Image (cartoon, grey):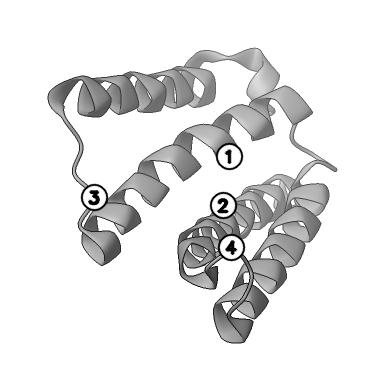
Amino acid sequence: MESKVNAWGFLAVAIVSEVVATSAMKMTDGFTRFWPSAVTTLGYVLAFYMLSQALRSVPVGVAYAIWSGVGIVLVSIVAWQLYGQKLDTPAVLGMAMIMGGVAVINLFSRASAH
């Protein structure tokens, strides 16, 4: 049980790291600015390392579905807060469906390695 808990923790850290890296990428100006580029690079390195740790216990398809679904929503929220990027109703509805899919996987799928 402990390895499953650790795996979900690794996946959570991977998602947050990827969101930070993706959000910082906009500030890199095509990787011409050092600090935002360093944050982006280190964020992705940490994200992929943590994802690799999560994949020891979580099936790759499930982990990737959660990673991408939660990441899409979180990056959109960060972009709205930091960069003032707006989402229209269809975008919000689409993201709600993505999160619904993630919830279905976690709550009902036997593949999610509960």
| Cα–Cα gap, marks 3 and 2 | 21 Å
Marks 4 and 1, the one that precedes in the sequence? 4
Marks 3 and 2, the one that precedes in the sequence? 2
Task: Report the quarter where the C terminus lies.
Answer: top right
At label 2, counting other C-alpha atoms closer than 10 Å, the crowd grade (few under 14, some 14-19, many 20 or more) is many
Identity, as a three-letter code, of the amino acid under mark 4: Ser
Q: To which residue does mark 3 refer?
A: 85
Q: To which residue does mark 4 refer?
A: 17
Q: To which residue does mark 1 refer?
A: 67
Marks 1 and 2, the one that precedes in the sequence? 2
User: Image point 66% across, 32% down: which residue?
Assistant: 64
Q: Quick check: 8 left or right of 95?
A: right
Give the residue furthest to the bottom. Answer: 35
Q: Secondary structure at mark 2?
A: helix
User: Image point 38% across, 28% down: which residue?
Assistant: 99
Please tell me the numbered disc located at residue 24: none
Q: Mark 1 and 2 residues: CB-CB less than 8 Å, in contact?
A: yes
Q: To which residue does mark 2 refer?
A: 15
Evaluate whether residue 114 shows in this view: no
Q: Give the mark toward the camera: 3 or 2.
A: 3
User: Image point 58% across, 62% down: which residue?
Assistant: 17
Count the numbered circles shown: 4
At label 4, counting other C-alpha atoms closer than 10 Å, the crowd grade (few under 14, some 14-19, many 20 or more) is many
Identity, as a three-letter code, of the amino acid under mark 1: Trp
Q: Position of residue 103 (x, y in %)?
A: 42, 25
At label 1, counting other C-alpha atoms closer than 10 Å, the crowd grade (few under 14, some 14-19, many 20 or more) is many
Marks 3 and 4, the one that precedes in the sequence? 4
Q: Mark 4 and 2 residues: CB-CB less than 8 Å, in contact?
A: yes
User: Image point 82% across, 49% down: which residue?
Assistant: 52
Q: Mark 1 and 3 residues: CB-CB less than 8 Å, in contact?
A: no
Identity, as a three-letter code, of the amino acid under mark 3: Gln
